[in-house]
Amino acid sequence: MTTRTAPIRRALTALLLCLTIATGGLAEAQDRRRKVIIDDEGFALMHLMLLDAPDVDVVGITTVSGNVWANRATALALRGVEIAGRTDVPVVQGATYPLLNSEALTDRWETLYGKLVWKGAWMKAWVEPTQQAAPPYYGPTDPVLLPGGNARIKPSPEIAALFLIRMVHAHPGEITIVAAGPLTNLALAQRLDPSFAGLAKELVYMGGSLNPRQVLANTSAGDFAREYVNTPRREFNIRFDPEAASIVLHSPWRHITLVPVDPATATQLSPDLLGRLAKVATPAVAKFIGAMEPGFPLWDEVAAGVWLDPTIVIAKETLFVDANTQFGAGYGDLLSWDKAYRPGLGEQPADVVRAVDPARLETLMTRLIANAARPAKRR
């Protein structure tokens, strides 16, 4: 080694050492990100919140029938990840039909016990006038052509229940499942693999209803609160597939956070909020947000927010919960007990969120949407 090359070699060695440390630090930071799978009926602000959170690794999005059929939910999710610039996240289609419930059974139930306010994929018209537009009706296998066109990317060829099982085995104790639709996929996964729930880190579920009250004094909020006046325990996600909900709520999760509709009655996707979110978003996301219909409560966004920032929760309690699977007037209603009064048939304890701070939630949403628009953002 000559005296001229020695300093060069020392400099190169130091540079390689710095690169190794930096790369290792980045890999360690990536490993520390919280892993989550989103199980839902399409694509909404909730997905953007989780995709845009810098400390979150969205392992995949699984779809299920609920508000729309599973094939349409999948098409919406595929286009959503394209709009968000996150085509690295796999979209996996799940169950088309509930375990036992059906459109025909629901029609029969309504002739016996009265009309449902919302029926999701089975919805043909609102029972009475409401601020929101009448939803289009499709069959479960009708071709899907989204307004503005379908995504260029394709869904994963895997089945959602098998994807869920595979992921919790690959990352035991690390995966949070944020479910914001009927629980059919999770019930199928649990029945196929009894170790499924125990291998996940936790379940955060938007579903159920305890005793919500109208908080916002406007027409749109009143439209959504009117059902709870006479049926305070009914909520769509559980009502669409009560049997699946009961299976999942009896499964041995390490931890369950239940976000019923109650806290969402104080929230709303207002024109003002939509404007603020669009203002800080990327052009593609801003266009997506601008096409959203205002007036809906922030059901799913509350669930995502509670997991991302628990400080938005201002009231919660621990309850043991189940879904009513008896085909009667209370079919699909949420059942709940304090510990001493539970039946003792395998019900699991859940942290039930009763109220959140809407202002803190909206601030969180705005910050996360803005985060995605920053050029230096790392995935």
Image (tube, grey):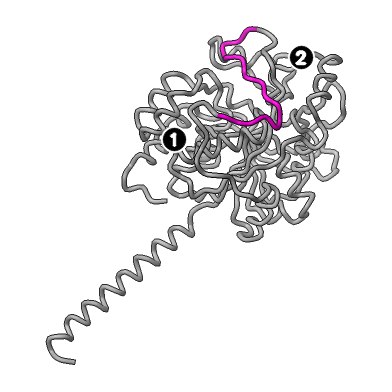
Q: Where is residue 28 in the image (x, y as percent from the top left)?
A: 44, 63
Residue at screen point 51% across, 35% down: 312
- Magenta residue check for 225: no
Q: Position of residue 321 (x, y in %)?
A: 75, 36
Q: What residue type is labelled 2?
A: Lys
Question: Residue 236, located in which quarter of the rendered image?
Answer: top right
Stretch of the chain drawn in magenta: 129-145
Q: How crowded is mark 1: few (under 14 residues within 10 Å), some or many (20 or more)?
A: some
Residue at screen point 75% across, 39% down: 320
Residue at screen point 76% across, 46% down: 188
Q: Position of residue 154 (x, y in %)?
A: 56, 44
The reply, left or right, for residue 244 in relation to residue 153 is right
Label 1, label 2: how many angstroms apart (C-alpha)?
A: 37 Å
The reply, left or right, for residue 75 in relation to residue 226 is left
Residue at screen point 43% across, 63% down: 27
The residue that disc 2 covers is 115
Q: Which structural element holds mark 1?
A: helix
Q: Which amino acid does label 1 sit on?
A: Leu
Disc assigned to residue 364: 1
